[in-house]
Structures are given as structure tokens and as C-alpha cells.
Image (tube, rainbow, N blue to C red):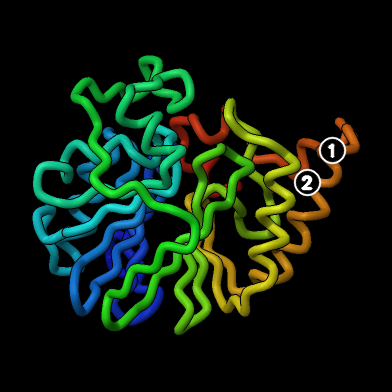
Amino acid sequence: MNGNERVTELQPGIFQVRGLAGSSHSYVIKGAYLNVLIDSGADHNFPVLERGLSEIGLRVRDIELVINTHEHCDHIGANRYFQEHALIAAYRLAASKMILGDYYVTMYKGNDLNEIPLRVHLWLENMTRLDLGNYSLRIFHTPGHTSGCISIYEATRGLLFSADTIFAGGTLSYIAESGSVGDYIDSLRRLRCFGLEALYPGHGRISMTPAEDIDRAIENAKILLEGRSEDREKIFFYKQQERSSSDAAVEGS
């Protein structure tokens, strides 16, 4: 971890830039063929991201592809600083909400409102593969938190960029406006089939026990289906936490 404690090299050429004040983390992959950013984070967090890129020797214009894991404003808000020079990619069910300005589902509604139209140049599908030369990314549609959620699997090292599908410790994200608990469980069961070595989530800490975390998340999702309200505080990453202006709330996920 570097001196500002906001940038961590997780693997050779793979960096986490931690988000502040409710913004998602961003992940930077220095590919042999192109430089990739997974989630640009919230608009207000862009100065943090820009400094993080500088720490790893990149300018904003050096990012050639931005992959958005889903359509929420804390993951896509800083796209505006990249979309003039980089390709923006999102799963098709997220892309449609982004480009049409569906502020109810994207949760802008005055929260970090990005006035300029958002662009999506690449509409991703399940099983899309991106070959970066030194790394290979596979896109998996993992609905549950939202209908447009994806997880990104790097097969050569067993890495999962899980965004808001699963957090360390098996904590779940809340079920957003287009989400579904049933879809959530199906997505988690499919992710459990991979030989994972590390989990890189959209908020909170990384995990080196992904299989255990997924198993716990599946059990937590079943609790949601059973309606055991007394257990919800223990398993749920609530909407108000994701929107919180406190970085401590993000770290507590």
C-alpha cells in the first residue's frame, strides 16, 4: 500500500483505488494490450481516482476501457471524465438505464447528479471475454442487487471482481429497485463453481476466502427469503450505508 493508503497493488499490474464518502472502489488493470478501469466511482470521488491513477503512473487519458459493473451512481458517476476518450462498457440491462437517464434506478435523484448524458459504447453480454494479453477477463451476468449486475472473473489467477454482488465475509448488498433475492441466490451459486483465490468487492475490504464468503452469502440470502427480520442487520449492506457520506460506513461492510 502506498503512502496515501488509498492505492494498493493487489496483483502485478492490478490496483485498487479505494473510494471515499460512499463511492465504490475502482480497480485498474494495466493490460499488455490496453488499460482497463473497473468502475469509475462517484462523481465527487473523481479527484481521489485521478490521484490514484497518478500514483500508479497513469493519466486519466491512459485509461482505454471503463467497465461498469452495474448502473448505480456510486459506480458510474465519474464516467463523464472518461467517455470522450475511452470506451465505456456495461451489461445491456445496465446500459439501457444509463444512457436513458433512468435516475430512479441509477439512484441519482440529486445525489451526485451528473447532468451530461452518459454513454455506453460496448453493451456486454453474459460470457463476454476480454483478452488483455497478461490477463483474461470473463464477464458474468450476476443479477440480484440489480438486474444489470455483472461480476468479472480473471481466470489465470482466480480473481473475482464482485462489485456489489458479494462483499467480504458473505455480506449481501441490499435488493435494489430492479433486483431479486431469487436471482441473487442463483448468481451466487454459479459463482461458487469457480476456483476462486481472491474476492475484490465494490466496497469494504478484499477477501482471500471467496468460497467461504459465497457459501455464507447464500445462507444469508436464504434468510432474506425466509423473512427473518431479526437477522437482517447482521447480513445486509443497507441502502443508507451505501449512500453514506462516511468512509467508516463503507469500511464496515
Residue with the mark numbered 1: 225
Left or right, 71 with reference to 174: left
Give residue 110's quadrant in the image: top left
User: Which residue is at a point 31% across and 74% down the rendered structure image?
Assistant: 131
Q: Mark 1 Cα within 10 Å, few/some/many (few <14, many 20+)?
A: few
Left or right, 55 with reference to 232: left
Tell me, for residue 221, which label it has, or none.
Answer: 2
Along the line of sight, the residue nearer the viewer: 223 or 237:
223
**Circle 2 SS class:** helix
Give residue 79's quadrant in the image: top left
Tell me, for residue 90, which label it has, or none.
Answer: none
Q: Residue 21 appears at what percent x and percent y?
A: 40, 37
Q: Is residue 81 above or below residue 169?
A: above
User: Which residue is at a point 19% across and 64% down the rendered structure image?
Assistant: 55
Q: Is residue 188 above or below residue 226?
A: below
Q: Residue 203 appears at what percent x and percent y?
A: 50, 50
Q: Are marks 2 and 1 in contact (CB under 8 Å)?
A: yes
Q: Amino acid at mark 2?
A: Ala
Whole-angstrom CA distance, mark 2 to mark 1, is: 7 Å
Left or right, 188 with reference to 47: right
User: Which residue is at a point 84% across and 46% down the rendered structure image?
Assistant: 222
User: Which residue is at a point 49% across and 30% down the rendered structure image?
Assistant: 243
Give residue 56's quadrant in the image: bottom left
